[in-house]
Image: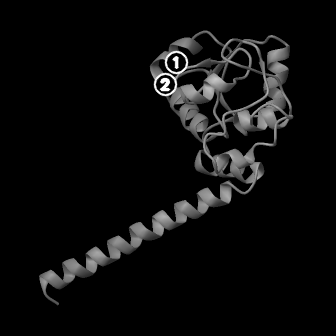
Amino acid sequence: MSRRGIIIVASLFLAAFVLLQLASRGYREVEALQSMEKAMAAVRRDFPAAKPVSTAQLATWLKAKEEVALIDARAPEEFAVSQIPGARREPSLVKAAKMAEGSMRVVVYDAVGFRSAEFTDALATAGCGETFYLEGGIFQWANEGRSLVDAKGEPATGVHPYNKLWGRLLKPAPQGTGR
């Protein structure tokens, strides 16, 4: 086979490999959208080194007023709709690490857990003590009827859906909340 033929065959194999990887990733994402349980399992699979904390455990820590640096890793428009009481939005890893200094525990959350698990991995690598991501994120927190506040600190019932597909994992909010 000529050199040109070898290059063409190798290019075809490479293209096929890339397409298979993309298809596999797309399938995993679609599978994760089927239920909160599958979404949480996908986060655990994709970020095996990140430590999850359940919504029940976080609620216990917050109720006992244990020292927890609670970091919201969502976009500003998501944070503006609602957040877990006591959370601070901090997208910068360096600033989040400073914010977490001296805290016994650091808990990061987002909509479902993908962004926060990745963020938690980075914080742990940076040497921030005991770091966790909230398993199921704010969606699971809201689905369990736990307290939320808006940007002004007032009670909130709605959660930003992230996008139309992921928003299907949110249980409907009580009437008149706009979720």
Q: Residue at x 60, y 34 (%)?
A: 116
Quadrant in which the N terminus appears = bottom left
**Separation (CA) of disc 2 from disc 1:** 8 Å
Q: In this view, does 83 lie above or below 119?
A: above
Q: Which residue is drawn at 75% across and 34% down?
A: 178
Q: Is residue 156 above or below residue 141?
A: above
Residue at the spot of label 2: 126
Q: Is residue 161 above or below residue 65?
A: below
Q: Is residue 54 visible?
A: no
What amino acid is labelled 2 in the image?
Ala
- Does residue 54 appear left or right of residue 93 in this picture? right
- Estimate the x, y position of residue 95 in percent, counting from the top left: 48, 16
Residue at the spot of label 1: 97
What amino acid is labelled 1 in the image?
Ala
- Does residue 131 appear left or right of residue 9 in this picture? right
Question: Does the residue at mark 2 contact the one at mark 1 (Cβ under 8 Å)?
Answer: yes
Examine the image and state in which quarter residue 151 appears.
Answer: top right
Q: Residue furthest bottom?
A: 1
Q: Which residue is drawn at 66% across and 34% down?
A: 160
Q: Is residue 120 visible?
A: yes
Mark 1 neighbour density, 10 Å: few (under 14) some (14–19) many (20 or more): many
